Image (cartoon, grey):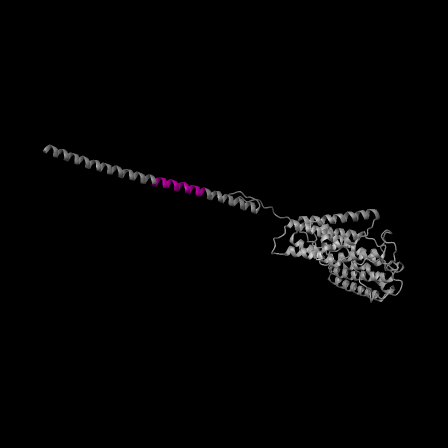
Amino acid sequence: PSDIDKLQTRLSDDKNTLSTIWKRINDKRLPPIPKSVLSNYFDVLLDYYETITSNKILLNQIGKNLLYLLQLVNNEQTKSNILNRLKQYHVILNEQIENDKFCQVDLSFILFLKLIAHLYPTSDFLHPITTPAITLLVQAINHCSLKSLGSCRQVLFLIDLIKQWISRSHRYVPEIIVLLIKLIQLACPIEKSQYFISSSSKQIENNQLLVLKKNIDLSNSIKLTIFDTNDLDDNNDSHRATILQTYLNHLIDFLQIYESLSAIVEIAEPFKSFLVTIADTTKCSQISSQCREILNLIDTSKTTCLTNRKHLEQGKEQAKMLKLFEPRFGPVYEGKKNSRLPKEYDERLRLRRKYKREHKSVTRALVLDTEFIAREELKQQVEKDTQRKRKVKDIQAQLSMQEGEYRKLQKTK
C-alpha cells in the first residue's frame, strides 16, 4: 500500500495483511521489490503505528516489521522521516511549555520513543537519531507535571523509558535524579522531612499526593502498564500505593545502574532522609520493607564506592636547579662551517650534498665512457678504410701486370 488509507482498508478486509505483505517482501521466488517502494511502505507503517495506542499485539508486530524494513533499507528517506516526526513532537512540547511552563505527554509520544529505542542503538552518544530523541525525552522529564496520580503514572512511564535507554551506556542524566526526588517528596509528610526541593504550583498542586492515609496490602496489586487508560482517583490509597511501589522499583534500578559511578554517594544521599521517613510513617508493610531494602543498597554502594574512590592529588613539584657559574664554550673551527641546525635539517643537507657529489661523479664517468666509445669507433673505421685502400691498390697492380703481358703477346703475333 502506498498510503495509510489503503493499508487501513486492507486491514479492515483481512487482519493478516501485514503478514501477507511481509511474506511477499521475503519471497525469493519473486522479483525483489525496489528500495524506494520499501521506503514508502516504511513511512506508511510508521504513520499507522502512531494511530494505534491500545492494541499491544499489533504494535509489537508493526515494530518488528519496521525493524526488518530498516535493516533492508536504511537510507536518508527513513532517517529524515523519523527526524521530522521528532521535530513535530518538539514543537508541540515547546508550545505546551511556553503556555503552561509544564507539559503532559500523551501515549503516542511515549510509544514513538519506545519504537526509536527498538530501532536504533541507544548506547551511542553521538547518533543522528537517538541523541535528539533522548534530548527531547529529557526536556519532557524536566518539564513534566505532577498534579495528579494520572500525571504521575505518565511520568513513571517516562522514567521507565529513560531507564531502558541508559541501561547499557550508564549515561548520567541529572534531570531524572531531580524528578525522582520530587516524586519521593510527594510520599513524605512535609513536617517530618529534613530535605525538601521547592517546586512550582503549576507543576505540583498537592505536596502530599502520595502519602498513604490508611493501611494498604499490595500482595495482590496489579502492575502498571502503558496501555492502562483507566483514570486514577487522587483520593484512592491503593492507587497511591501502586504508584509508590512502582516508583521504588525504578529507584532501585537506577541506583544499580549508577552504582559504578564514583559520585553515587552524592547522588543517593538526598533519598536517604525521605526513605527513612517513609519507612517509619507509611501504613503499607511492603513499601516500608522496600524502603529499608533501598537504604541497605545505598549503604552498600556507599561502602564500595568510598573504598574504591581515589581523590585527586596535586603532582609533586620538581626541585629547581641552582644557577651555577659555568664557562662559556665558543664554537671550534674545524675547516668547515659549524652549523647549529636541527638534526633532521642537518641530515637532509648532508644527504643533498652527497647526492650532488655522486651525481657529478656519475656524470663525469658517463662523459669519459662516451669519449672512449667514440675513439674506439673511429679507430675501427680508420682500420677498415686502410684495408680497403690496400686491397684496391693490389687489384690495380694485378690488372696493370695482366695488361702488360697481354700487349707483349700481341706484339709477338
Q: Can residue 170 be seen in this snapshot?
A: no
Name the image quarter holding residue 175.
bottom right
The image shows residue 115 at horizontal and vertical percentages of 73, 55
Relative to 339, is 366 on the left or the right?
left
As displayed, is residue 339 above or below residue 108? above
Check the image and name the residue furthest to the left. Answer: 413
Residue 192 placement: quadrant: bottom right
Residue 200 included in the magenta stretch of the image: no
Nearest the camera: 91 or 123? 91
- Residue at 26% in and 38% down: 388
393 above or below 75? Answer: above
Q: In the image, residue 296 lies at what x, y percent?
A: 79, 65
Residue at 24% across / 38% down in the picture?
391
Q: Is residue 361 magenta?
A: yes
User: Where does residue 297 sit, x and y in percent of width and height?
Assistant: 78, 64
- Camera-side residue of 140 and 305: 140
Q: Does 204 sit left or right of 86 as displayed?
A: right
In the foreground, 304 or 96: 96
Residue 411, visible in the rendered structure: yes
The secondary structure that most of the magenta stretch takes on is: helix
Q: Quadrant of the C terminus?
A: top left
Q: Is residue 82 left or right of residue 397?
A: right
Q: Residue at x 30, y 38 (%)?
A: 382
Q: Is residue 346 above or below residue 263?
A: above
Q: Position of residue 9 (x, y in %)?
A: 73, 52
State how many labels appear: 0
Magenta-drawn segment = 360-376
Farthest front residue in view? 13
